[in-house]
Amino acid sequence: MPISRRDILKSLTFTAITGSVLRVIPLEAAEYAHRMVRAEKAAAENQAYAPKFFSAHAYKTLQSLCQTIIPSDDDAKGAVEAGAPEFIDLITSENKEYQVSLGGGLMWLDNTCLDRYGSAYLDCTPAQQKEILDLIAYKKNAKQDPSLGQGIEFFAFLRKLTADGFFTSEIGIAYLGYIGNTFVREFPGCPPVPEA
Amino acid sequence: MQVKRTPKTYDVCIIGSGASGGTAAKVLTEGGLSVALLEAGPPVVPETDYKEHVWPYELPHRGAGVGGRARQGLEDEFLAPNGAWEIEGEPYVSAPGSKFRWFRSRIVGGRTNHWGRIALRMAPVDFKVRSHDGMGDDWPLTYDDVAPYYDKVESYIGVFGTKENISSAPDGIFLPPPKPRCTETIIKKACDHLNILCIPSRLAILTQPHNGRAACHYCAQCGRGCITASNFSSSQVMIPPAQKTGRLALITGAMARELVVGKDGKVESVSYIDKATREEKRIHARAFIVAASTCESARLLLNSKSNLFPDGLANSSGVVGRNLMDTVGSNGGGYFPQLEKMPPHNHDGVGGMHMYLPWWKFDRKNDFLRGYHTEFGGGRGMPGVGEFDGLCNKFEGYGSALKQECKKKYGAYIGFSGRGEMIPNENCYCEIDPAAVDQWGIPVLRFHWKWSDNEIKMAKDMQETYREIVEAAGGIYLTSTKPDGSHPYGIADGGVIIHEVGTVRMGEHPATSALNQYCQAHDVKNLFVTDGASFVTNADKNPTLTIMALTWRASDYLLDQAKKGNL
């Protein structure tokens, strides 16, 4: 009979403590069991994403902004490939305050673009898009033009959520160079530290 | 509604299955007694409940939780289950002008499933503070009374550390410590330069196989719960051996409502709500151990009113709910340019600090009484939600420049957390709210809280020290705090450090304390309160190790009484 994940995990947690067969748990058994957990969790995903909160238009705008905030470039793919828009839509669908600040923020952006350029954000030229984003990407701009305040607030929040979505993804974690979440017999300690 | 009775009478009924209740269950069942262990939450199933080794991208919410809860300062999705600042249907109240937060875990093992595993002994002077500086009260026991039980607990659960012979931080029985991380070597060097003590930390994590449990595999995720049981939790280390005796009845989903007293003035049963059926049930026993957590234990006693005990059980002194303490906490952090140059490497280690700063200014006069220790950490950990908030706010902008800046600064920060002793004061207590009940119909707690000047001066010293260390290490201190406002010098709100203790304190005199040195109620001989509620003071040592040592000692005393036929 093939040994199941449950069997292994059971042996890891209980029989070891109560002192039966497995006195010392082999590291390999622990790693094997954890890999199985991971595979099961991964299998539950892998389906095309339908936005839960944002309208089709708003979601397209969100994707465009995520792509601009953390773009795909020569170093690594960007926030869209990393699933940031899905993540943001999901938590927004569950949070009334986010629905107002992000849903409202996207509308503020479209309204402002209509006033300034006569088109919603997605229909603006790349130069117009850059112009408005350069205005709302920095707090200091609100001092000269207080009417940008709401846009600045919105963009600052979206920037954080986009960073969350990107840097918690497989792409983002590899880009940062995090090494860990592994099984090692002994902690290796620190490589030589360069001087300050 | 009919009240259901369980006909069996147990030797002992324990209420709560955390650090204290689990320890009592192990010691008493192994000593031959039959025990009913009540837990308000569900059983814990490590293989499905613990999110160890899961990557954030394997969860749809990436660790942020439903609605981004983790971003609102609520619990991290990865945290071991059933711990929460707010539990639906089970509210608590802060009195006007008071801010107190209460973290509760409704699950077998309680808060030990996720705790920090920091296992520090109280020092001899910590038990005799009033004799030392005139504030607070002395404990009715000494370090020498507790030391053999610290030995027993450490030997059984496994704690790493090193012998240092520092009077404010007594040595224990230690497994070898893990090697320092980069962040720790940098801070150690700066502390040496400043004559601040920095030593290997003392955590209940196994660096070697121990008592049939596997050694740590260094994934840094203790807070998620450990599937290999390589760190201490009551659910995995205390309760299984108790179950093995065949003398433990673990009853989950059981919310204790009232301790019922017989005509002889002894507790004869506990009345509880079976959460699954919403029915009221009872457990009869010869002795009762209340270990529901500091404030929950006080709540149960205060809600157990009778003709014999009109002010609540074991409360003829009026101290139950009083003497509420938490730990003084203030955080600071810095950016270290030399860490930017570190090549990518495995920085995980155990789930907590490999080194820490014990209280080092015990040999001089300070601006405040008592002391604090410092926990610190940072570096190249697994990226998580909110990790780049600070950087996004500071750098602003967007595009590849922002992306590169995050990569450059990733892992280049170290944070410090001061953990100091609070002196109990009359403004900090809990009581039964006159109006509100929880969904089980049980009256809830109302908290009163106010820090005194001593704690605020301590927080100031923490901020100054962390700036000094960061700058000595070649870093830039990033934290700024104000001397006034709602959080002077960054002092955390009451309860936030989750070290609440003292609400059913022990003492020599029944007029000013509720328990004797064995955690036995002065007023009710078959009633013990063994959790943090029994504490007289709250030294800068995280309370869990002392809770277990005091519980083990009380359980030995109870076993001895049982042998003498006094149950």
Image (spheres, helix red, strand yellow):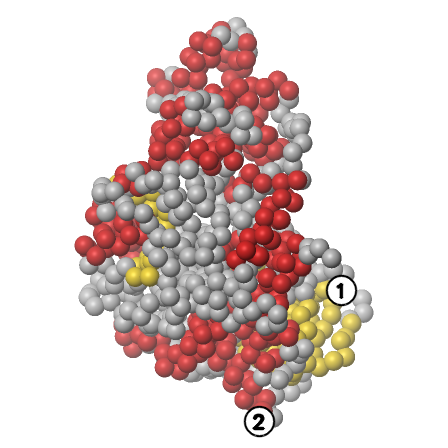
Quadrant position of residue B337: top left
Q: Residue at the spot x=42%, y=50% of the render?
A: B348
Q: Is residue B219 left or right of residue B305?
A: left
The answer to whether any part of residue B448 appears in the image is no
Q: Amino acid at mark 1?
A: Glu
Q: Residue at the spot x=67%, y=31% of the render?
A: A47
Q: Which residue is mark 1?
A: B279
The answer to whether any part of residue B560 appears in the image is yes
Q: Nearer the viewer, residue B342 or A158?
A: B342
Q: Is residue A51 above or below residue B64?
A: above
Q: Amino acid at mark 2?
A: Lys
Q: Nearer the viewer, residue B361 or B344?
A: B344
Quadrant position of residue B354: bottom left
Q: Secondary structure at mark 1?
A: strand
Q: Residue furthest top?
A: A118
Give the mark nearer the N terminus: 1 vs 2: 1
Q: Which residue is mark 2?
A: B564
What is the x, y in percent for residue B445? Answer: 56, 60
- Mark drawn on residue B341: none
Label 2 chain ID? B
